[in-house]
Amino acid sequence: MTRAADSDLTQLNQNQASHRGLHQAPDKTPDKTPDQESGEKLPMNAAGQSGPGDRRNAAERSLLSRTDPLSKLIMLLCAAALAVHISRPLASAVLLGLLWAASFWLARMPLRNTASKMAVIALFAVPLFVLTVLASPSGRLYAGIGPVEITSGGVEDGLTVALRLGVLFLSSMIYIETTEPRDFIYMLARWFRVPYRLAFGISVALAFIPLLEQEGRVAAAASAIRSGRPPEGLKERIARMRRLAGGLFTASVRRVQQTAGAMDVKGFGAYEQRTFLHEITLSRWGLSAAICGLAATIGFWSVV
């Protein structure tokens, strides 16, 4: 009888609990994200996905990012032509300074980020400077040990070549940072009549560069955490670089396989012509800047 009473009491408690559950107020819905509250729609990135990191408000976008890719390409070629033509280190330094100012004011690239990338180029520019100084002795002799001579002409040529490398890299970086891959594809396929399969391959290569850079930073940080100490000696540094290179190569191959599979599923390349969702037109500002760049290049060509 005691067992029956306990069973009846348990059943009564369960019924009361279910009865209270039916009359409870519904749970509060989760708070909306800031994007939902503001009603802002996240734009799509190059991979067709949206995210907070890809948000580009029209008021916050730089002037160069709103310029059409063809006008920026003309200005890029003008800067490259001047960099190759200039034979004086002072003129090359002025051109590099103008590009650095344009990267900050027109492209809104952070100075610290630009400086870190230019430091990487300096690792190649310094050996190039040394080789040029030793390979082209001319002018006044500064110092010499046997057949090795350091002259004024060699130093000027070395500075010019090193600064030229910086100009070419910085101008290309500005173009890559301010140009969407889909706009670059549109320019090649529509305006230059390049087969869209080839244009897409070029854009994928450009899109993979920052992804591999980010993965390299993550892999380097993970390796530093696992080791517990920085590498000591040249042997450990080479071994660490070898492991990082192997990991990046594996990640890049995996990413290429995933991209190729997605392209096959979507039927990419099934037709000879491709339509574009976003049409691009030449802007007045872009055409004006390109014309001014051409005029400045022609004007300074004979001066420098």
Image (tube, helix red, strand yellow):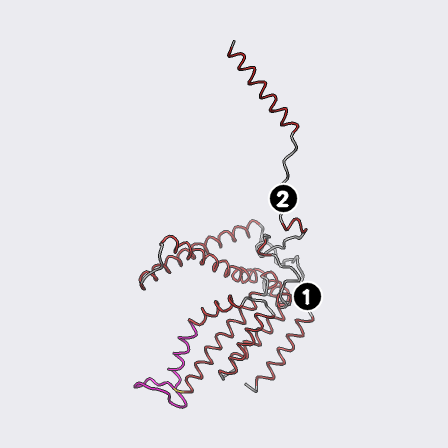
Q: Residue 20 is drawn in which quadrant? A: top right
Question: Which numbered disc covers residue 31?
Answer: 2
| Residue 135 % position (x, y) | 38, 82
**Picture residue at 66% right of the left edge, 32% below the top:** 25
Which amino acid type corresponds to the residue marked 2 in the rendered image? Asp
- Residue picked out by circle 1: 281
Q: Is residue 66 magenta?
A: no
Question: Which numbered disc covers residue 122?
Answer: none
How many neighbours does mark 1 have within 10 angstroms: few (below 14), some (14-19), or many (20 or more)? few
| Residue 53 % position (x, y) | 57, 56
| Residue 12 % position (x, y) | 59, 18
Q: Nearer the viewer, residue 95 or 82?
A: 95
Q: Nearer the viewer, residue 200 or 223?
A: 223
Nearest to the eye among marks 2 and 1: give it: 2
Query: Element at badge 1?
Result: loop
The magenta segment is: 124-150
Q: Does the magenta stretch include residue 129?
A: yes
Query: Element at badge 2?
Result: loop
Q: Nearer the viewer, residue 83 or 29?
A: 29
Q: Residue furthest top?
A: 1
**Picture residue at 54% right of the left edge, 51% below the top:** 262
